[in-house]
Image (tube, grey):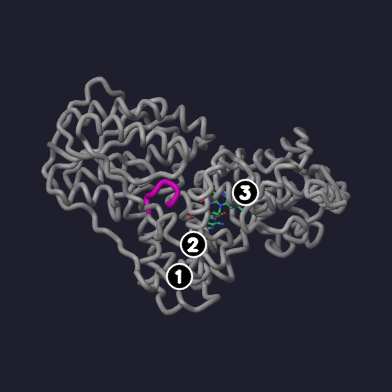
Amino acid sequence: TFQLVWLRNDLRHYDNAALHAAAQTGLPVVAVFISTPQTWQQHDMAPIKQDLIRRRVVALQQELAVVGIPLLAIEADCYSDCTAILRQLAQQGAVGLYAQTEYELREQHRDLAVTHALGAMGVPCFWFDSQCVMPPGSVRSKTGDIYKVFTPFKKTWLAQLQHKGVRVLSKPLVQKTIALDVTGFTPMLVGDDSSAAWPVAEQQVLELLRSFCRERVQDYQQARDFPAIDGTSSLSPYFAIGVVSAQQAVARLQTEADSALWQEGTGAAVWLSELIWREFYKHILVAYPQLIKHRAFQHDTEAIVWGNNEAWFAAWCEGRTGYPIVDAAMRQLNQTGWMHNRLRMITASFLVKDLQIDWRWGERYFMSKLIDGEFAANNGGWQWAASTGTDAAPYFRIFNPVTQSEKFDPKGIFLKKYLPELAGLTGKQLHWPHPLPMSVQYFRPVVDHAKARLRTLSMFKAARGES
Ligand code: FAD
């Protein structure tokens, strides 16, 4: 007999609640990962994220082998294949299945089907709600309500952290190894190596977290808004697939910067705030499952009549809007699979409020390109930018892309990196090169920001029934 651990978005062996609990039973543990490219495609998962997952699973196989846990990596098509695969493995003597809870709809259906199928064989499933330091539903107001606004959510979240602390689990102890019969299964395929720039060894990723918290977090508050500076952690791809947990991040921050953590405005406190945003959007998603169907959080904004100009959308996707900061940012996304947070805000605002394109188009495009694509954060970010979400930017606050560029890339270092055609320009002209000097070949602006802004204001007013 053995315990079966089904790994999904928790691709780590330190602080893995499901692995830890299975190992604690003293029985041999077998881990399984099932790749489902067809479902991933339905979810618009970026190829680079798929590759990161595949590379990470291979690394995890080696890490788990050291503690005597075989990780079976099986290739399938879609979520509905998981039930049969797990049933077949469980038939070989599993006494329990252990896995981390996932919050999205198709994932919930998949897990329910597995629970029923294995339950019918007398194999119980144990689900661990460990994606957040504070699981969804556990941060509530005094009257028991879910918060719809970030600031009070954060206040209660911090009070709970102070009260309860954070617990990080050790890696499993060395187990008695057991081999299962895997004939009939297709071994997981290797990826296209597009994510090769991102290391996947768990120790290396934990070291990135450690060095960020030790050496860089104190400057986070000053540096985090400037895309030319390496001022943020760049850990998002690892949080997204669970190479590192939020618990580990908070515990590490406490170890390295505990006194600063509780002082408003320090780098450590602001970074913790970002981790709380990550949890806030997951809590909101669980409380309002209509979000998973891409509905607007604020129902009245469903009445907005978007322009949805396809040519403008293509220009935005391809980084040729004529607005340098938008174009450089989109090229960063297209070329690297990652985009700086300030630029995600600027490009999202531009798509929605300058081009009047439905935020769902941008949400989908981001997902199809991001190595850290994550439903709750992406949906939350887009609805924030589009003023349709919880605690969103007010609709009349519209980023000016040129001013944003001057403010957050004053010397144009980021612009020049992605727009070599503007290399000869300096000063204000770099941020707004129109009319174009004779020597420069660049795109004409797709819209005039001042006019676009007025169009957007009337579009929102019309949807709200204001004249
Ligand atoms: P750091 O600044 O070092 O932050 C640490 C961690 O906190 C991040 O790795 C991330 O897990 C979390 N975090 C930071 N900011 C946010 C935020 N605003 N919302 C939720 N979590 C946050 N983040 C994703 O992980 N996946 C997405 O698909 C995603 N889509 C976004 C779309 C839009 C339109 C916007 C405005 C933001 C989006 N974000 C998304 C949030 C944020 O931009 C990224 O998490 C951040 O840029 C990642 O870089 P980092 O790891 O260096 O972040």
Give residue 306's mark: none
Badge 2, how many Cα within 10 Å: few under 14, some, many 20+?
many
- The residue singled out by tag 3 in the image is 297
Q: Quadrant of residue 162?
A: bottom left
How much space separates mark 1 and mark 2, taking CA atoms? 9 Å
- The residue singled out by tag 2 in the image is 276
Q: Quadrant of ligand 1?
A: bottom right
The amino acid on which the numbered mark 1 sits, given as a three-letter code, is Leu
Of the residues under marks 2 and 3, which one precedes in the sequence?
A: 2
| Mark 1 touches mark 2? (CB < 8 Å) | yes
- x then y, percent, for residue 265: 55, 75
Any part of residue 320 in sight: no
Badge 1, how many Cα within 10 Å: few under 14, some, many 20+?
some
Q: Which secondary structure lies at badge 1?
A: helix
Which residues make up the magenta segment? 239-244
| Mark 2 touches mark 3? (CB < 8 Å) | no
Q: Quadrant of residue 112?
A: top left
- Closest to the camera, between mark 2 and mark 3, is 3
| Mark 1 touches mark 3? (CB < 8 Å) | no
Q: Which secondary structure lies at badge 3?
A: loop
Of the residues under marks 1 and 3, which one precedes in the sequence?
A: 1
> Looking at the image, which residue is at 36% across and 61% down?
248
The amino acid on which the numbered mark 2 sits, given as a three-letter code, is Ile
Badge 3, how many Cα within 10 Å: few under 14, some, many 20+?
many
